[in-house]
Image: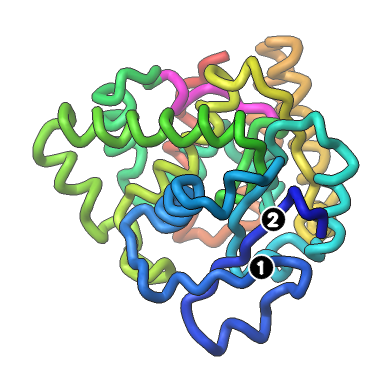
Amino acid sequence: MSASICIWQIYYQAVQQAQLDAAFTPLDNSQFPSETHELAVFQRLYSSSATTPLSAWGALSWRFAEKTGLTGHELLRIVQQSPSVDVFYMNPFPHIEALFASPWWHGEVAHPDLLEVANAFLDAAGLRTAELNRLTPAREFSMCNYFVGSHCFWQSYLPFVEQALQRADMHMPPALRAKMHSEDADWRKLHHASSYVPFIVERLFTVFLRSYSRHLKVQKIPCPLGESNMNEDLTELRSMKDVAVLSRSKNILTMWQEKREEYFRKTSSAWWCDRYLDRLLAAPVVW
C-alpha cells in the first residue's frame, strides 16, 4: 500500500474479520451504529486526523471481494496508477445498468415506495426530481458506496450529501419524512431493518456525478464478478441503452424497452412481473 493511499474495510462482527483483505486497513464499526450506514463512516474518517496526509482514501464493506471479484491489491494498484483521478467508483451489479432506466427505478423494485419518498426528498433538498426518471448511462451507475477519492472529492461530495439530508429533513411533508426514517424500505429484512435514508444516499452519488463533479476527474472501475455474469442479452441491453442516451434516439430507446420487456418476462417470476413490470414499462423517460 502506498503511504499516501489508505482504504479501510468496515466490519461489524469478529466473525467477519476472516473475510477482510490484508491489503486494506480493518475498521471496526460495531460501536458506531448509524441510520446512514457508510456515510457516517466517511464523515468520521474525513473529520479525523487519519485522512489528513492522504492523497486518496475510502472505506469499503467487508463483503467487497465477495461482491466485486476484485482484490485489495488490484484496487490499490488501479488507484496508484492514476494519481490525477479524484474519485474511483464501482457498481458490482452491472445487470442493473442494463435493465433499469435509472438507479432510482431499481430502488423502487428493491425498496417499495422509494420513488415516492425520493421524489419528496429531492424536491425538499432543492434537487431535480427529474433525476428519478433520467435515462442513466452505465458509466454513471455506482452502487454500494464503493468509491475511493481524493481530498478534493470528499470536500465536495460530503457537504453535498449532508446539505441534501438536512434540507430534506427540514422541508419534506411530515408523513413522508416519517416514512423515510421508517423500516418500510427493508420489507425483506435483508439490510438490518434499514430506513430509506441509506438507499437514497447511495443513489445521490449519481446525481452528484452528473451535476456537481465537473471540476473532478472521475473513473469507473469494472467489477470482474458482475461483468462475468453479464450474458449476451444483458450486454446488448446495456449497450443499447447507452447508445440511446448518447444519440437521444427514440427509436433505439423503444428497441431497448421492448427487448427489456422480453427479457424480464423470460427471466422473472409471474409474481414479480405482476407486481412491477407494468410500472417499469409505463415509466416516463427524461433525457
Residue count near mark 2 (Cα–Cα under 10 Å), binned few <14, some 14–19, many ≥20:
many
User: What residue do we see at 62% from left, 62% from top?
Assistant: 8
Residue located 17% across and 39% down the image: 176
Depth check: give the residue in front, 185 or 262: 185
The range drawn in magenta is 130-137
Residue 146 locus on image (x, y percent): 63, 51
User: Is the residue 270 above or below the residue 85 in the image?
Assistant: below
User: What residue appears at the point 46 percent right and 23 percent down from the top-left corner?
Assistant: 131
Horizontal and vertical percent position of residue 61: 58, 64
Inspect the image, locate mark 2, and give the three-letter code of the amino acid beneath it: Cys
Give the number of the disc on residue 45: none
**Residue 274 appearing in the image:** no
Dot 2 and dot 1 residues touching (CB under 8 Å): yes
Q: Which residue position is annotated with label 1?
A: 25
Quote the CA–CA distance across marks 2 and 1: 7 Å
Left/right of residue 31 with respect to residue 63 in the rendered view:
left
Is the C terminus in the top left, top right, bottom left or bottom right quadrant?
Answer: top right
Structure colour scheme: rainbow
Q: Is residue 188 left or right of residue 169?
A: right
Pick the residue in front: 276 or 7.
7
**Residue type of the residue flagged with mark 1:** Thr
Does residue 56 belong to the magenta stretch?
no
- Residue that sits furthest to the left in the current view: 174
User: Does residue 6 appear left or right of residue 172 in this picture?
Assistant: right
- Please name the residue that numbered disc 2 is placed on: 6
Secondary structure at numbered mark 1:
strand
- For the N terminus, give its image quadrant: bottom right
